[in-house]
Amino acid sequence: MVKQTTASSPLLQVEDLGKTFGQKPPVQAVRGVNFSIAQGQTFGLVGESGSGKSTTGRLVLRLLEPSAGRVLFRGNDLGKLGKKELRQERRHMQMIFQDPYGSLNRWMSIRETLEEPLLVHGLLDPAGRKQRVETLLNEVGLPKAALDKYPHEFSGGQRQRIAIARALVTEPELIVADEPVSALDVSVQAQVLNLLLNLQESHKMTLLFISHDLRVVEFMCDQIAVMYLGQIMELGPRKAIYRTPQHPYTRALLDSIPGRGKKELPRLKGEIPSPSAIPPGCPFNTRCPLAFDRCFREQPALYELSPGHVSACHLAEAEGQPQGRPNNIAMSPGTGA
Amino acid sequence: MTNISQTNPVLDVKNLAVTLTIYGRPVPVVTNVSFQVRAGEAVALVGESGCGKTMTARAIIGLPPDGARVGGSIQLEGRELTTLSKKDRRKLGGSRIGFIFQEPMTSLHPTLTVGAQLCDTLRTHLDLGRKEARDRAAQLLDRVGIPRATAMLDSYIHQLSGGMRQRVMIALAVSCKPALIIADEPTTALDVTIQAQVLDLLKEMRSELGLAMLYITHDLEVVSDFCDRAVVMYAGDIVEEGPVASILTAPHHHYTRGLIGAIPAHDEDRKRLTLIKGQVPPLGAWPAGCRFAPRCPRADEVCLKHPALEPFEESAVRCWHPVELKKKETSTLG
Amino acid sequence: MGKYIRRRLLHALPTIFIPLVLVFFLLRLAPGDPAVQILGDNATPEQIAALRTQLGLDQPLPIQFLLWLKGLFTLQLGDSLFFHKPVLELIPAYAAVTLQLTFFALVIAMVIGLSAGIAASLLRGKILDRGIIGVMVFSISLPEFWLALVLIFVFAVTLRWFPVAGYVSFDEGVWASLATLVLPALAIGVRQAALLTRMTRSAMLDVLDEPYVTTARAQGLPEATVIGRYTLRTAAVPVVTVIGLSVSYLLSGAVAIELIFSLPGMGKLLVDAVSRRDYPVVEGSVLTIAVTLVVVNLIVDLVYAWLDPRIRLK
């Protein structure tokens, strides 16, 4: 039996996580990523395409082998677990994908789809399985009659509900949701987001929520990490990120939401560089409207601006402190906890 | 903006109806749609999948799906389009109407160069030689913010980034200085910082060329500082029409209200999103009365009759019980 | 581009070499002795042994293989055991007949297949489309040898439009020569025409549904440009693959059909050589066919690269 988490340690801890794909040229998808998620929290990874957020999600679940760093889940280093132990741990961590159609087996009825994870992990007797599956289906808001139907008989929103039910059926502690509502219409998206919140409360689950949509991330997440070119640029509680963002990239992202944003920075020029040719210094220096000579020489450290709010920007040095030291400086006005 | 409403509309759609044939059965997808777009004005056509917004656009450019019947009247710069010959109709595309599609990667030809595609349009509509067309194409690419424009003429679409592809698409749409641009979710597939750049570019093109713009989107907030007016569609009907700002802050139709409530709001403490119960009725199974009635919190017997689109406060709304601005409660609908 | 061609050629080498090695061993493992075949049933064992030594057939198999390899790489394919002429002098005359037949059949298949396929796709769901599909399904199910016999019966025996069998070379008159090839070419070409029709139709339908074709129409380009320049260009890519495959089928079909029409082509040469245990001729014929297939595939690859810059620029 693997050891259980104690109340004080986080459920998930990611340390110096890195992933490089291919050889010539190597694609550095994720570099030196650190974060931890406390039990019952929703942690958001937000970024544009090529930011490494999806790769990070897959590394956390060990669907991909990290090139560097480690992932501690319930206090266990997933990299050190044997095949069998890892399989057992998988019961406690599940994934929801963007495309519910692609991720459901179209030859399997909904009943078979939902029972499969239980069978794989050898959980419950037939009567218990039936009970569990029916309860969950009810919780995600689908009628019992759905059980003997097949994925193509459902709309996109209903399929995503089925995918959510499947992820929950083994009663996992951690769910990684990769763009779970991006393929859905606005009103259906709202239904699924509300459902996720309700389920999170009733099941006390912890959520790693990956999305490019800043509005959805703000709605869903307690803690948010903004990623760019495989690195975390800024990390902090929701209110800190959305009310007092420090990093120019975060500010630019927020300014880019049409109909919102303070528009205090000039519009970002150009596009995200290729992860196989990451610029030296700060990775954001090619687009940053505030970049100065140091940004091209030196990669910024993470500076702590307020408890739990860190930013990888040279400009944050004056405001903040290198991470890890006691925090006793004055916070910038309006910095929320 | 007062001068806009005095000019003649560039696009005047009246009682547009589109009926598809599905398994030999006529199925209406757009009914009784009327709206106008004036020069320099941008109108958002808003709705979820299956509401008929894309069919409306396809009918306007004269490329409805096979077997579709189009009724009603479509006037472009005072000219009736529905009675034109197929050939004359075709010629207006690219010259008077530009179309911007959602996915530039699949909407531009994969094995023809960017320059070749631009030159094809330019030489179809303008009397230009090979060399002149190429020069014009390079100017266009430069104008939409593509670096090294002349060299880029010889590139293929797969060699460009997502943002650059959409810029090429825009260059193609404005190449012959059209009067009307129809943009079908032109930024939905783009990253948020690139989306902002492309919206800026569209704004520039719009004021520079005095374009009338019909902007099709599922997300009203995205176009809130881009469009002047919005037309909201549900199940083939226009349910509400009015200034974007007033529709966003004080929607009158219960569907519009639900749609706006479904967008997560900024800087609020976490609560649940407003939901519209149930699902969009499938094509061919629209309710006989108000099509939104089965999902509407306010529906009663009167809603079994189909309401007309009637002026209401600053907007027009198709509802027997429109939400009144003055009596508007702060609570959300159940 | 040069790198692309070089890579393709390198890939082709095993395609030539492996069938040759297989043929070498199959021939020698099969029963029957070429010396007996050459000398006839009345030969004495001493005569046979002498001839075997002369032909190198008394050497152990590995040694024979090494000698054969050396011959292959120096293009010394040896003399025909039957004709007593160098293989390389023998083959061209036969190859010419087969290539003419294949080419003729390919032209028939392409002209019918491409035009019927394009027409059907542009008239999707209309009566002509359905008619074309019907004829196509029927044609695909026709066995070639059976079709050959029907063609001979109808057009040669009954109507007397074309000769029943035999071959007239180009030097003796182009029309007479073509007349001898019409029926065999039809016999093997019709089925490929049907396959090409199907492929062309579905490739065209796929491309006609592509958003970029809608863009071209929305940009007001004339329909002729939309079809000719925007649709055919991309639809051609899968069609070219099928044409490449068709050539292989036509070549093997030609070998069989030559026997029915008594055409002096590679098929006849090969079949005769096998029954005579004429090893060098069999090997030479296989080499010729393999090289032809490789050349055809190379041409297909080059056409690909020309049609699709995504391949060229990789």
Image: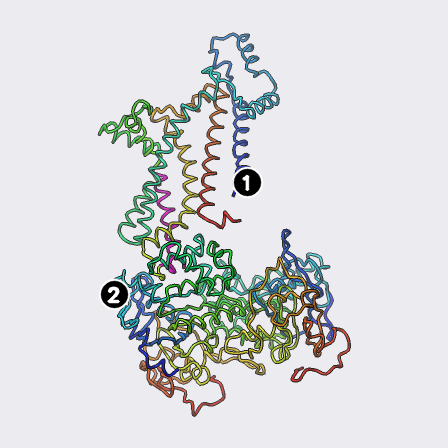
Quickly name the residue at label 2. Answer: B84
Q: In the drawing, does residue B184 fall left or right of residue A280?
A: left
In percent of width and height, residue B26 lies at 29, 66
Quarter of the image where one finds residue C242: top left
Residue reaching furthest to the right: A326
Q: Is residue A127 visible?
A: no
Q: Is residue B159 above or below residue B52?
A: above
**B55 vs A175, nearest the viewer:** B55
Quickly name the residue at label 1. Answer: C7
Q: Is residue A160 above or below residue A264?
A: above
Give, as a single range, the part of the protein colored magenta. Answer: C191-216
A336 is within the stretch colored magenta: no
In percent of width and height, residue C53 lies at 57, 13
Q: What's the distance in space between the residues labelled 1 and 2, CA to CA?
A: 55 Å
The number of numbered badges drawn on the structure is: 2
Amino acid on which disc 1 is placed = Arg
Label 2 secondary element = loop
Q: Chain of mark 1?
A: C
**C271 vs B181, nearest the viewer:** B181
Q: Chain of mark 2?
A: B
**C92 vs B213, nearest the viewer:** B213
The label shown at residue B299 is: none
Q: Is residue B188 above or below residue C298?
A: below
In percent of width and height, residue A316 lies at 69, 75
Q: Is residue B320 above or below residue B160?
A: below
Amino acid on which disc 2 is placed = Leu
Residue name at image x 75 percent, y 79 percent: A327
